[in-house]
Amino acid sequence: MPMPEWLRVRRGKDAGGRDAAQWSKCAECGEMLYRRDLAANLYVCSRCGHHFRIGAYDRISTIVDGDFTEIGGEVQVGDPLQWSDRKSYPVKLAGDREKSGLSEAVVCGFGQIGGFDVALGVMDFHFRGGTMGTVVGERVTMLLEEATRRHLPCVIFTASGGARMEEGMFALMQLAKTTAAVTRFMADGNALITVLTDPTTGGVSASFAFQADIILAEPKAMIGFAGRRVIEQTIRQKLPEGFQAAEFLLEHGHIDIVVERRLLKETLVRFLDYTAKGAAQRARAEAHA
Amino acid sequence: MNPFMDREKALLELERRIAELRTASADQPVDMSSEIGVLETKYQEILRDVYGAPTPWQKVHMARHPNRPTSLEYIAGLDRFDELHGDRHYEDDQAVVGGAALLRGRAIVAIGQQRGRDTKENLRRNFGMVAPEGYRKVRRLAHLATRLGLPIVTFVDTKGADPGISSEEHAQSEAIAQCLIAFTTATVPIVASIIGEGGSGGALALAIADRVIMLEHSTYSVASPEGCAAILWGDASKADEAASHLKLTAQDLRGFGIVDEIVPEPLGGANRDPSGVVTRVLEKIDAALERLETLPAQRLLAQRYEKYRRIGAWARETAPAGRF
Ligand SMILES: [Zn+2]
């Protein structure tokens, strides 16, 4: 199968050149960064180390070795509640498709990381704030089911504002659906690794993000169940700086490691290596039995 | 704002006058039955007018009514209940109550979110908003149920999981995520009843079930109407509008196949006949368990998987190609 166009573009000599003329301002230190340099530096500020939010296809191109075969692209939402407030839900979706270049808030598929075959799911905050509706739930479930069939480990990058309001209870039910898929995947002896990126909250945080065997997070990523604003309104006081940051969660024992983006791939490779060795050791033990 | 407040006052006033006339007529030879009759007709008219076809936002208030039966009333309707306390780690969260019980002679584990009726009780029960310690208690009880072969019966009644500082520090997400796993993998029948408000992941943590029962005027939604309005429009006061969008009524959810059956309430809501409603819900739970307990565990798990696997799986058409 030929390499998909988006991956070829990102791997070519002119990587980052799609928007070469653009500059981006670092939200943390204010530095003006040349878009091409920023892409080459994995969307991390070269001055202060701030991790920019990164699109799903950019993420995949920085993580997988070679090719990536997407699955679930055909899964497309209807409008189950016939939702319409300031705009109708289909109009909101069309707008986000146009803006983000994505068909939905997660991209799922298969590829290799450091020579290990993996199932890979990557959420993208630029589409409806990475919220989980029926498409995200269905694609993640399909990914886990296919990974179970192939006996492959699964890596999921999360970035989500929670469940998608416009799909109401259908969105909430995706927590149940993905959980069901996670339990079957795990019962079959496969490893789930999640990488929590900025932000990971609500329904995604309260389901597969925190059901993983190994939980990594990017520096300063905001991670929690309730959003900052909701908590502040409830307790009627300002939350301290760094509350719900990845480092806060590490300190409180919620996650395994905070990993800088430039070290992320090699970290994943090391854990995939343990996973593969474990599977081989188990197979050998079973052969003796 | 409670949309019923004025009308409820009028109803209470009528109730009071009818009772007064009854007492008075018992003591006196004068026949007041016609006056009483007029007031009672009026009373029924207002009742039908106010509660006959409640809007979603009115249902939210019926679901939150202080006199609506709470988990403890349902638990009191069981043959026997022995409360079990704590998460075995840190605390005994009073916003959720659970223990071993008998329902019509059948041994079960019963678990319910518990809100208070007054300020004092609400402080103790944290308004029915469960903290991570509470969800860890629930998970422990679900494991206990599986270990001992006791079906799980839950009563859902919460605005949502507790959104406080210590809940975040104690990993609310993880606590709920693990509850979801415990209910998904429990090898005993699970029956969940939405008796009041079912708010978000905090409700779902007790509601992954083989049979989901919902009271006629309960609500169950992806977020509370206030939360939804705040998320979408940055304005919690537009909650009534959010309620109408969310499709949070029992009738909507039965239509979606997310809820399996609806238990009717008297005109005016469950608070008008608490013991009758409790009895009817317990009968439904009993009937559901009767059917479910004949299934072997593997069948039960497969059926539960399929039930949740199907929700939203209809959404398959050809996607517009990504632009990349
Ligand atoms: Zn910077």
Image (cartoon, grey):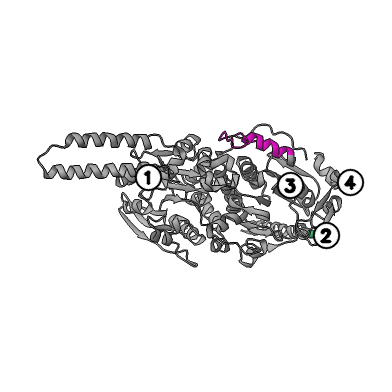
Residue furthest out toward the top: B317
Same chain? Circles 2 and 3:
yes
Q: Nearer the viewer, mark 1 or mark 2?
A: 2
**Which quadrant does the N terminus of chain A fall into?**
top right
The dominant secondary structure in magenta is loop
**Which quadrant does the C terminus of chain A fall into?**
bottom right
Q: Quadrant of residue A268?
A: bottom right
CB-based contact (under 8 Å), mark 1 and mark 2: no
How many numbered dots are placed on residues in this image? 4
First in sequence: mark 4 vs mark 2:
4
User: Mark 4 sits on what residue?
Assistant: A14
User: Mark 2 sits on what residue?
Assistant: A46
First in sequence: mark 3 vs mark 4:
4
Q: For the residue carrying disc 2, how many other residues have a C-alpha within 10 Å: few (<14), some (14-19), or many (20+)?
A: some
Residue type at tag 3: Ala
First in sequence: mark 2 vs mark 3:
2
Q: CA distance from mark 3 to mark 1?
A: 45 Å
Q: Quadrant of residue A41?
A: bottom right
Subunit bearing disc 2: A
Q: For the residue carrying disc 1, how many other residues have a C-alpha within 10 Å: few (<14), some (14-19), or many (20+)?
A: many
Q: CA distance from mark 3 to mark 4?
A: 19 Å
User: Mark 3 sits on what residue?
Assistant: A56
Vertical placement of residue A118 versus A97, above or below: below
Residue range corresponding to the magenta coloring:
A73-98
